[in-house]
Amino acid sequence: MLRNLFKINIYLLFMVTLLSARLDVQSTPIFLQKQEQEWIENLQKPLKIGITENPNQILRTKNGYEGFSIDIFNKIESLLEIEFEYIYYETREELLVAGKRREVDIIFSAQKSEAKLAYYDFTDSILKEQHIVGDIGYDYNLHIASRNDMPTLSVILSKTVDAISASYIKTLQLKWGYIQEQDHNLLFKKIMMGFFVILLSILLWVVMLRRDNKKLQEILDSSIASMAIFKDGKCIHVNKMLLATSGYNAREVLGKKIENFICPSDHEKLKERVKTSQEGYEITLKRKNGTMYPALVKGTNVTGNRRISSFIDISEIKKAHYELESFNATLEQKIEEAIKKNKKQEQMLSQQARLAQMGEAINMIAHQWRQPLHNINGLVMLMDMKLSKKDNKLSLLLNKELDEIESLTAYMSNTIDDFRNFFKPEKSKVQFNLRETIETTFKVLKPMLSYDKITINNHYSDEVILFGYPNELSQVIISIVNNAKDVLMFNNQKGEKYITTHLFKENNRAVITIQDNAGGIDTEIIEYIFDPYFSTKLKNGTGLGLYISKMIIEEHMGGELSVTNNESGALFRIEFELP
């Protein structure tokens, strides 16, 4: 209770002292006339004060100027709320000459004389007693001199000097040694004042220390890392994160060395790192329950033989690192397996596309064989009829009809060979004539297209020799033409239907274009037609034909396959770089 009462008394004494100091700063206000206030407000630059070194009045130091006159000018400056600029001269003679030349506006405390009145106006004596002899043996009767061509300035300065209290002047006289206070109890007062100042300083230091400690603790607790401060190797501060991570409470940590909380095998490592490095390093920390965990540590030495250290639990990071290393160890094998799987899937897609085209090829064979078989059947029936009538010309007709049958069966046999060669897998690239490959492909397609009354127009501008897979190229052409045929039959059933092919060279590239007049591809889906399993056919569409075609041209043969719409229909463009 007494301790708290003592604290309250000290606090009240401190507040009274501060209030007294503030009241002293707020001196008696200056009442200037309106024109004098306006003169101050219209100042465009600081007033220049000429000074030279003078005992106790003007002292020149490395930090600026100080002394009795400087304190007076500071007081005037604060009362008038104006700005002074000090111009220093080595001698008083130089200062007086500068004043005559109007290089300065004011001269520091000066003796009044008739000669000076020709150039200056003077305030009343700064010292309230007109004639004082100080202990330093000098006769003072001091005034502030200002240019006599600025009479308003002299009036303002005079009023300001009058506004400065005698107690303030006396304080400055005591401060700078012009007078000495005659008081038998002065020593006692000084001792008590010194004791009070020391006590007040201690109290302020304690308050500020507690405030700083609280602020420091708040800063430490705001960190997401575990943090501790050590002095002479012992812990003096910890944050909440460290206590939560380690499981200790503050009493169990404060005053202890860090060695008490780390794995014994890391003690030497810790000592070496603290001496030689400020970089982060890894050690193993020990929790209260005895478990160990890896932590990243970084320490910084500060004043007062203190060291701030931060600890980051990297258990999860280490676990992830081990998992990553394990994953990387098998990554190459997984990639190889994925490549094999993709190749197998690619082969399956290609096989699906070939099977789909084989079905279409069978339809072609049916188209090509239907008419020859019909003709063979008719010839056989005719032979029967003629043989039954025992026509005399039987032998001649029989030979002619048999020749026709032989021709038709040969055509059918050649058709089978054409399809067998088309579906034969190619294992290596060969040189082939691009025009011959296109013609051979359309020879297979012609019967089917003719049956559906679709006109074929092939134009060849150049002879082109390529190195690649001709059968795969034929597969691409068949896939594009089959799609064009289906769209022509759906969109253009009654009108003229045609498919036009061009072969030419352009910018050192071989170009094949396949054009139909079916009206083009819907703009909303044209960018998706090369995607796998994307089909516009309502029935029997696998969505693999154009996907496989693009893969063959671009991945197997190093070319480019694209599609656009023009005024009549879709235009497929196949390009190959020429050697």
Image (tube, grey):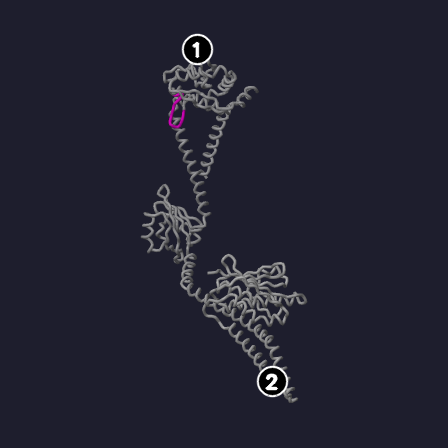
The answer to which image quadrant residue 210 occupies is: top left
Mark 1 is on which residue type?
A: Ala
Mark 1, Cα crowd under 10 Å, few <14 / some 14-19 / many 20+, is few
Residue sitting nearer the eye, 154 or 464: 464
Residue bounds of the magenta highlight: 56-65
Q: Which residue is mark 2?
A: 396
Q: Is 60 inside the magenta-drawn segment?
A: yes
- Kindly report which numbered mark, 2 or 1, lies closer to the viewer in this rendering: 2
Residue 530, compared with residue 36, is above or below; it is: below
Q: How many angstroms separate mark 2 from mark 1 (CA)?
A: 165 Å
Q: Is 363 inside the magenta-drawn segment?
A: no
Disc 1, SS: helix
Q: Which residue is mark 1?
A: 115
Residue 403, compared with residue 244, is above or below; it is: below
* Residue sitting farthest toward the right: 494
Q: Position of residue 139 (x, y in %)?
A: 39, 14
Q: Position of residue 31 (x, y in %)?
A: 54, 20
Q: Position of residue 13 (x, y in %)?
A: 46, 32
Residue sitting nearer the eye, 474 or 117: 474
Mark 2 is on which residue type?
A: Leu
Q: Is residue 303 visible?
A: yes
Residue sitting nearer the eye, 137 or 11: 137
The answer to which image quadrant residue 187 occupies is: top left
